[in-house]
Image (spheres, grey):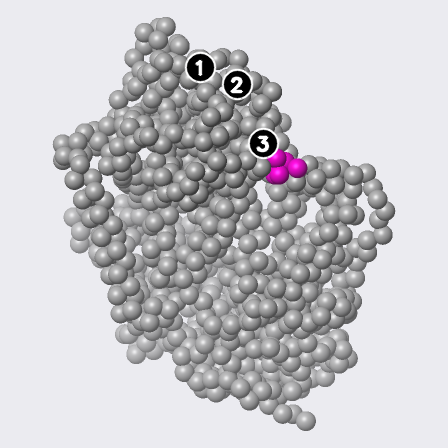
Amino acid sequence: MSAALLEIRSCCQAFPKADGEDLLVLDDINLTMKEGEIIGLLGRSGSGKSTLLRLIAGLAHPVRGSVVYQGHTVTGPAPGISMVFQSSALFPWLTVLENVELGLEALGLPEAEIRKRALAGIDLIGLDGYESAYPRELSGGMRQRVGFARALVVHPNILLMDEPFSALDVLTAETLRTDFLDLWNDGRLPIKGVVLVTHNIEEAVLMCDRILVFSRNPGHIAEEIRVDLPHPRSRMDPTFGDLVERSYVALTARSAPTRGTDRIAFSGIDLVLPRVSANTLAGLIEAVAGAPYNGRADLPVIASTRQMEVDDLFPVAEGLQLLRFADIEGGDIQLTEIGKQFAEAGVDDRKRLFQKQLFAHVPLAAHIRRVLQERISHEAPKRRFIDELEDHMTEEAAESTLRAVVAWARFAEAFAYDDRSETFSLDNPS
Amino acid sequence: MRGTIPISVEQSRRVFTRWDILAVLLVLGFLVFVGEASRHLLQPLTELQATPLSLSPARLPEYAARTTLRMLVALVLSLVFTFTYATLAAKNKRAELLLVPLLDILQSVPILGFISVTVVFFMALAPGRVLGAEFAAVFAIFTSQAWNMAFSFYQSLRTVPEELLEASRVFRLSRWMQFWRVEVPFAMPQLIWNMMVSMSGSWFFVVASEAISVGNTTVTLPGIGSYIAQAIALRDLSAVFWAIVAMLVVILLYDQLLFRPLVAWADRFRFEQQAGVVPPQSWVLDMLRRSGIVAAAVTPLGRLWRRSFQLSQFEPTQRASLKQFGGRWGYRIWAACVAAFVAYVAWRVVTFISGNISLAEFGDALLLGLATLTRVVVLIALATIIWLPLGIIIGMRPRLAQRVQPIAQFLAAFPANVLFPVAVSAIVALKLDPNVWLSPLMILGTQWYILFNVVAGAASIPSEMRDVSTNLQVRGWLWWRRVAIPAVFPYYVTGAITASGGSWNASIVAEVANWGSTKLKAYGLGAYIAQATDAGDFPRIVLGVAVMSLYVVVINRIFWRPLYRYAERKFRLE
């Protein structure tokens, strides 16, 4: 009864870096999916969960290992695997009905059959009356419903979902999730299994039978969490809360850069910096420093009171840890002495503290200052540092890292950057 | 509720409506028009030459019809070219390496250059028949339309959102289906806009393409263009006037019957999913949509079309990548082949020219080019000084902008030749220097691109930004410098690029002006090419065209392209 629907065998994926070497983004992924399962891929951005989904969809090919579906290796988009996209990816020039019919047309079905199945799908997903509307006339939630109908009418065995609720507001997302779960639990969906990519922990616990927690550098499955709660699940259920807490711990335990001498000694300028503004960092410090936390807080609690999702919160926490304003351990955040001083300080002292931490703990910032000091003109082009960074990371990450360091340096008045001429310099305009 | 319900969804229960009558009339009218205008194609050429063009206004509708048909055929050919050439360039890395630079150069070759080099070939295709000459004329019009359409389509193909492509692959759309259901719709709004620009461009050269005169080969095909040429040769002012009226009518008809329906129809292909903007309307499109007969005729066609999607199979291959080359070495070998081919062509051109022309004359041609360059620069600068502020003022007033836009687009289509009578008479009467006073003719048609791009830019300044500047009391020069000009700058650059390219092209027409037997000539590369064309002096035509292409390509590379990128990066309001 629980035959393997899909098997992923030691899959690795890598992308070329600027210096010609490959950057490993997925390392040795193994997964067997049984019939009737909803599997959640939970992780931070950059942990490779979306990459894995694309491998299953046949949109990309692993450099090593294989994806086996119904006894055949997946070499391209397979019939029987369909997908719901984050932004719904509807064709704006087709009506709701035409969008839903598109996949059926590609199957080469007779016209009467196409119409019948499309209308049935529209009916199932609650889109009656919207057949002739264009996507631009619909709200985000309705658009995503069309995305679901389009993916379901081709009667797939496996439905892939790439953060399908993350672009929606909280209420709409909840309605759509509940509707989907109702249909699934009533056995009214023509599918045998679901793979859901998400960075929302509660969503994962609410929907999935198994949660695979992904970790970064390179992306791998850090932990597997089983959810045996019956549907419909309640957030008030203590077990639910435990599972959320467990997921948080799993996410924080491995994703934050490991501390310790070996790591620090190794991490020169090659550290990919999170794009978080200094004001956001200050905001989290103040929140943790204030009542009722008084310097130590539970991350899930902070997240829910500040209405932040994992992807919003973690880069901030990671930034604080990087600059030694806070420590993160077992799903908790704890301010360091410097962090507490920062919370107390006024504007000028904050800048001074921030500058000190920046030069002490962000090698790239120290490096840029050193280069600027050594040059007679006290100026250096952006290109110089980008080239250096690209030896260690992708083009995109290099650009993003440099932008992050510029933003922090501006707050700390550490050095200046002129975007028009793309040059760094020591003197700030006074 | 807009009338955009797809025909196939609604059960057709309609009876014969007034829309049907109109639609049938329109279709029949079109068929009659095509038949009438193409009847003469197989006539021998001698008959055409025996019956000179009549300047009677009564003949104008017929001439206008023939010109219109030629442009339509050229437009269809341009579309075919666009769909094949641009698709190949976008889909095949190997082809891209060759096709894109080639298109860049083709775009900079003056349109008259194409005519003079190819006319003999086309005449030979149907010896002694009008058809051959028609080929040549249609090809000439084609060259004024195809390049920017192909470029726009190529750009669109490369910017189709990744998600849509992924969705089409997940749902296993075949290549053929993906092309028609995803890529063409995405490219459509840009493509239609470029078709309109192309149409304006081809009006500008309508005289040159119908009254073909290269050395001993002289063909005058009946049409508005040759009518104007004849009127100028005979100094018939009233005929010139009637020609302008006929052109106005044809341009309006094109707008109402072809472009407006197309724009209204293509509105649903807009990718930005914004609500609240008033969609463009067209009575022709409404009529076709509401007519039951049209629906009955279109539905089976649509069904057949969808059938064709099933004939091609889904291929689970990856998108274009380095692998297509067979690795890095395959790429290098292919690049070397292309380089060798280009070197060979260049060598052939050089030997062809140098066999007949001394090095000194090559230097002269470069100097002539410099003279034309100076004119282009000065004129663009002048047009900027005039139209940038005016365009901003107009664009800030939406109702005025709506009225000015179509007028500017009409003026862009206006061929400079029809103003020659005025220009030449004035220059002769006032004893002015033709080197200076012929120049404005070059920018006559092209300055409007600056105007309507700036108007569009000013109209799209967010109202919040205007409110802020009002709130902060930013006025006068500060307002222009800090708010208005930066906000429209990317639009201005787009317009100026089109205007500058068009002006180079126009120099061939504008640097030599005739009015009867009075002939004025300015010192410049355009005049050089025009004269060589008149004399049928092929080495000099090739030299002139090559030098002009060189100037245009170099200026695009070192000036316009960097400026465009800078404007995009710095001032794009998004």
* Quadrant hosting residue A271: bottom left
Q: Residue at x 68, y 76 (%)?
A: A155
Residue B33 location (% of width, % of height): 63, 36
Q: Residues within 10 Å of mark 3 (few under 14, many from 20)?
A: many
Report if the CB atoms under discs 1 and 2 are less than 8 Å apart.
yes
- The chain letter for the residue carrying disc 1 is B
Establish if B518 lies above or below B562: above
A205 or A85: nearer the viewer: A85
Per the image, is B34 magenta?
A: yes
The mark nearer the N terminus, 2 or 3, is 2
Residue A416 location (% of width, % of height): 31, 48
Establish if A99 lies above or below B450: below
The amino acid type, in three-letter code, at marker 1 is Leu
* Quadrant hosting residue A98: bottom right
**Residue at mark 1:** B234
**Residue at mark 3:** B65
Distance in Å between CA atoms under marks 2 and 3:
16 Å
Q: Residue at x 41, y 56 (%)?
A: B89
Residue A353 location (% of width, % of height): 36, 57
Q: Which residues are magenta?
A: B32-36
Q: Residue at x 79, y 58 (%)?
A: A129
The mark nearer the N terminus, 1 or 2, is 2
Question: Is the residue at mark 2 from the same chain as the one at mark 3?
Answer: yes
Residue B412 appearing in the image: no
A271 or B375: nearer the viewer: B375
Circle 1 sits in a helix, a strand or a loop, which is it?
A: loop
**Residue at mark 2:** B55
